[in-house]
Amino acid sequence: MTSTGTMTAGTAVASRATTTSTRATTTSKGNAVPAPSVPLPPIDEPQRLAPSEARELSRAFFERLAVLEEGTPEYQYVRNTLIEMNLSLVRYVARRFRSRGESTEDVLQVGTIGLIKAIDRYDVYRDVEFTTLAVPYIRGEIRRFFRDATWAVHVPRRLQELRIDLARAFEDLEAANNHDPSAAELAAHLKLPEDEVREGLIACNGYDTDSIDRPIQTAGKQQTGLVADLMGSTDPALDLAENIQALKPHLAQLDERERTLLRLRFGAEMTQAEIGKELNLSQMHISRLLNRACTKLRKGLLAEV
């Protein structure tokens, strides 16, 4: 009994020492050791595994990946299988970005890059779930894609991130109040200054653009003309109307003779000589009176600027 007990204890200690030694030599991928003899379970369609099954199988594949030499066929097989098994994580994270208006396929491809980075950096012996590392990597890669590649106009990063917060706040407030929230309501909801929220709303206009040369379409049928045809242009008559309204209070401050001179010169379009004959004044005197009236009006208008 004593001999058998001693052998059993010795076997357990040796087994534990072997396990510890194996872990110590495989934590660094630079010093790879031969793969363990235990075969990996065959997986015909890794992408169709349920998330719970993929999570259980991933640990075995990660343990094998840690002891394989990079570049070998078996290393590539194990790594590719891990990628395919965990694509459900990419789809899970990508669903949060489905309202951004970008192609789902593009978002999934970018998220897969984050998944690959997580697989290459994961250490199976740290007793941390792979999803704990993978989800932030995938989310960060997708956010970087939206930040750097989807904006039509380059804006500062803080405004790009503010756009995401504004979009979520807009949906929450619209659902709660049944109307489009104002800048003040958005600012109160996000606990931000109203000026910063207004700046973010203006920056949102640079997220995507549309060509003014595209055809006008209504109810799926193309119509004649372009979007540019619907855009307004500067109307000189509007500037004239604004100037007249601005001059009215200053014209009222002129005396009767000055208003008469201006009416004859610019309303009836009479020459200074004709005005002189009409008022029995010399042309030179008429010129001085007109210059004085125009100077008064000019000073009054410039004082308002």
Image (cartoon, helix red, strand yellow):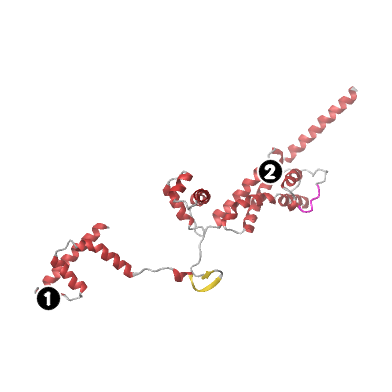
Image quarter of the C terminus: bottom left
Rendered image quadrant of residue 37:
top right
In the image, what residue occupies the spot 62% across and 52% down? 95
Q: Is residue 72 left or right of residue 193?
A: right
Callout 1 touching callout 2 (CB < 8 Å):
no
Q: Nearer the viewer, residue 122 or 152?
A: 152
Q: Amino acid at mark 2?
A: Phe
- On the image, numbered disc 2 is attached to which residue? 130
Q: Nearer the viewer, residue 180 or 102?
A: 180
10 Å neighbourhood of mark 2: few (<14), some, or many (≥20)?
Answer: some
In the image, what residue occupies the spot 64% across and 52% down? 111
Instruction: Determine whether 252 is above or below 56 in the image.
Output: below
Give the label on residue 8, or none.
Answer: none
Q: Position of residue 15 (x, y in %)?
A: 82, 33
State which tag comes first along the sequence, 1 or 2. Answer: 2
In the image, what residue occupies the spot 76% across and 34% down? 20
Residue interval drawn in magenta: 41-45
- On the image, numbered disc 1 is attached to which residue? 278
Answer whether residue 83 is magenta in the image. no
What's the magenta bit mostly, secondary-structure-wise?
loop
Q: Secondary structure at mark 1?
A: helix
Residue farthest toward the top in the current orientation of the protein: 2
Rendered image quadrant of residue 271:
bottom left
Residue farthest toward the left in the current orientation of the protein: 280
* In this view, the mark in front (1 or 2): 1
